[in-house]
Amino acid sequence: MALLARDAAIKVPFGYERCVLTAEFPALCIVCVYVPSSGRGLGRLSFRQAWDKRFRSFVFQLDRSKPVAICGDLNVAHQPLDLRNPSGNKRSPGFTREERELLGAGFLDSFRVFNPSLPNAFTFWTYLSGARARNVGWRLDYCLWSQRGRKDLCDSRIEQRAQGSDHCPVGIYLALEGAG
C-alpha cells in the first residue's frame, strides 16, 4: 500500500492497523485501506464485522476534525448494481448485508454520486474464465468521502482499462479550499 502526494503530510500516524495507511493534510485526512475478506464460506465474517466496527469508529473520530477520504479495496459490493450476478451471491463473501453496512455509515460513495445507476462499473475481476474480458466483475474498490464535504467533490473515476492486477485503480477529485 502506498500514498503519493504532491505536498508533505502534516502527520502519518502509525499503529492503527497494518492494512490501513492514514495521512493528515491541512484540508483533509486520507485513509488508504485494505479491508480483510470474510473468507470462503464466510468463515471470517465475525472477524470482518469486528474489524469494520473498529474501522468505522476510527474514521468517524478522524472526521470530527476534518473531512476524510477513504480509498482502497473494501472487499464488498455495496449495491446489486455493483456486481454482475447479485442474485447468485447474496450469501457470498463481499455481498452479505453485514458487510455492506460499512458503506452506508456516513460517507458518500463518490463514484455513485456521479454515476448513480451506471451498470457494469466493476473494479475487480477474477483471473478465472476470462472474467475481465467478459466484464464479469465486482466493484470492491472505492473512494468514500465525508458527507459534510459534498460541495468539494468534483468527480470520481474507475480506470477499468488499467491492466496489471485483478483490480483496477479508482480515483477521487476534490476542490478543497485552502489546499495548495
Image (cartoon, rainbow, N blue to C red):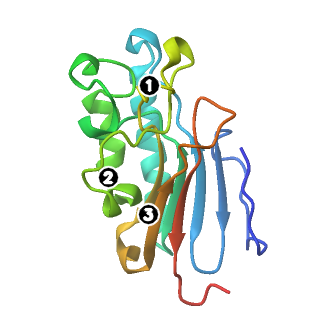
Mark 3 or mark 2: name the one nearer the start of the chain: 2
Point out the residue furthest to the top here: 41
| Classed neighbour count for the residue bearing mark 3: other residues with Cα under 10 Å, few (<14), some (14–19), many (≥20) | many
Can you give x and y, in whole percent of width and height, for residue 90 in the image?
Answer: 24, 21
Q: How far apart are marks 3 and 2 (CA)?
A: 11 Å
- Determine which quarter of the picture holds residue 165: top right
Can you give x and y, in whole percent of width and height, for residue 178 in the image?
Answer: 59, 90
Residue that label 2 marks? 105
Q: Distance between the residues labelled 2 and 1?
A: 32 Å
- Asked whether the beta carbons under mark 2 and mark 1 sit within 8 Å of each other, the answer is no
Residue under the point 40% across and 34% down: 76
Q: How far apart are marks 1 and 3 (CA)?
A: 30 Å
Can you give x and y, in whole percent of width and height, for residue 135 in the image?
Answer: 43, 30
Compare residues 128 and 71 and report the one nearer the observer. Answer: 128
Considering only vertical position in the picture, is 82 above or below 25?
above
Residue under the point 49% across and 39% down: 123
| Classed neighbour count for the residue bearing mark 2: other residues with Cα under 10 Å, few (<14), some (14–19), many (≥20) | few
Left or right, residue 90 beside residue 14? left
Residue that label 3 marks? 145
Residue that label 1 marks? 134
Question: Which amino acid type is marked by label 3?
Answer: Trp
- Determine which quarter of the picture holds residue 60: bottom left
